[in-house]
Amino acid sequence: MKIKIGIVLFLGGVIGLMAQSHYPGQHQDKLALKDNNRTKAMAFDMKDVTLLDSRFKENMQRESNWILSLKTNSLLHSFRTNAGVYSGYEGGYDTTEKLGGWESLDCELRGHAVGHILSGLSLLYATTKEDVYKTKADSIVIGLAEVQKVLNQNDYLSAYPQNLIDRNIAGKRVWAPWYTLHKLYAGLIDQYLYTDNKLALHVVEGMANWAYDKLQLITPEQRTIMLRNEFGGMNDVFYSLYEITGNKKYKWLGEFFYHNESLDPLKQKVDNLNKKHANTYIPKLIGLIRDYEIEGNKENKEVTEFFWNTVVNHHSFVTGSNSDKEKFFKPDHQTEHLSGYTGESCNVYNMLKLTRHLFGLEADVKYADFYEKALYNHILGQQDPATGMVAYFLPMLPGAHKVYSTPSASFWCCVGTGFENQAKYSEAIYYHNNKGVFVNLFIPSELNWKEKGFVLKQETKFPYDDKTTLTISVNKNVKTALYVRYPSWATLGATVKVNGKKIRVKSKPGSYINIDRVWKNNDKIEITFPMELHWSNSKEDSDVRAVMYGPIVMAAELGTEGMKKPAPYSNPQLHNDYYTYNYNVPTTLNNHLEVKGDKIKKWLEPVHNKPLTFKSVGLKNKELTFIPLFDLHRERYNIYWDLK
């Protein structure tokens, strides 16, 4: 049997379009616009990929328990109250439990989490195929449709009155009403795409028609003022509706939400990000790349690529996260921003969405490498394994700890995106083109490529083990290629065996290993990418470094001294506690290491029978244990070390 192995240099053009949580290749029966040929890698429908037992599946189950515990009547309460729809008496036998934090009745962002929850439920349904998620989502959509009808305001729908939108248009102080609406638009679109809920599509089309009628009437000056307020991915969702329906009113709306002040400098290849609110920027670029895929505006692709390269290479931490107190800072100045408010989780959520779009266009391994970095070192460890709660920030402050939300009294933006993050781990593992399958992530899972009659089962304990096994199941022989990502960090080489026979690997790290053959039932591929400890140097200061093992950021355990309840949880009784949190770091803790010039292996050794655990040897006045940052919870830690 002939087997061809080589570097994947170019992969023939295939289809490409996007919706809110839709990537090239998905939901082909739900789109009015024809696919185009601008992308090189197509996503599989989430229902075709099943997670097998792993930390990823455990996170998803904890997320599931939380999202199902939130009562539908509580989620709908602010919407019903806004419309005057019955929502239970105060007290007595018929009260409705009120949600707190950003979902409280006196918060101008109320309703945003409901949109995220609709998306989260749709993703859980697609991933698990379990009806419980669709049933819960259906009840929420029915409730929203009732509110929309009772409001009787040209199909306007929200948990707050239209006056918040009017204040935004007038330039008066208001907290991001279009941002909040974006979440609701997106959740309803996801319900249509992933659960085939046609009522959800009807409701969101009505909302879009309301927006079109309202925004047709405002002046260019009012538009400029309005767009200065954060509006999330409104351009994104309107392009989504345009793809689904073909209605050009929605294309007009997508173009209307083009923000000149933010995006025009990026078109000139100017890094204008310093001091800008990071999560205000990123969704705007997702909208641009959608426009490129539909309309072919090459300039929008170029500006998106420039933005991605600028953020990843000059504004991100070793974890793949970015920002300090939600804002970008000067390029390559990370060591000046080792604070307790770095790495907003929403930013990582949106950067991963943008990365998926760009990977689909180019099938470039750099996008898959970044996806792996941010997924393992931020998203996977965002969730508290004990409770399923999630963190707003990923602190870089030496001696800080992760601060988690509460079950029903937080509902920050990062809680909302967290409902999606923990539900969609299956979405970026595999892609395909017309000739084969990309294996981008090493996560236990099973792919069912129905069109080819080809099932691929991936078994691995990565990153605790450097081996991955792929097993083929087919009813009849299938000729196809496997493009296995050869990570840029795998500098020690790669070993590949097919049915026990070692084969030559000509590819290099930072490419794909192309295994092209006719596959038989039970064929087995064994892949090994050895990992080793290494430093990740900060660009602006070579003496400030982080410890890594392969792609995994290693953090030192620093104990729980000074952590008093409710730590490690936020106190929802305090105003903006997530943003003003006092970590009470003991004065005895610091990030100084006297190992300058020493190779890591000289002072850091593996702990026997404890994978991914290392202990220091011979350090003055301290002994440190390093474990993956994603495994470090409920205690203090440090990531960046000062070797001066």
Image: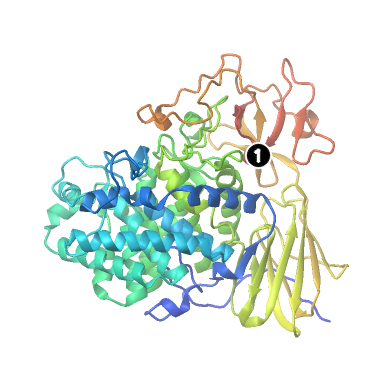
Identify which residue, 570 or 376, lies in the foreground. 570
Left or right: residue 38 versus residue 618 is left
Q: Is residue 480 among the parts visible in the rendering?
A: yes
> How many neighbours does mark 1 have within 10 angstroms: few (below 14), some (14-19), or many (20 or more)?
some
| Quadrant for the N terminus in the image | bottom right
| Quadrant for the C terminus in the image | top right
Left or right: residue 300 versus residue 309 is left
Task: Identify which residue is drawn at 31% across, 54% down.
Answer: 263
Left or right: residue 454 versus residue 407 is right
Residue beneath label 1, please? 631
Q: Residue furthest right?
A: 501
Q: Residue furthest bottom?
A: 476
Identify which residue, 369 or 109, lies in the foreground. 109
Q: Is residue 311 among the parts visible in the rendering?
A: no
The total number of labels drawn is 1
Identify which residue, 603 or 597, lies in the foreground. 603
Q: Percent from the top left, x then y, of residue 533? A: 73, 40
Regarding mark 1 in the picture, which secondary structure is present there? helix
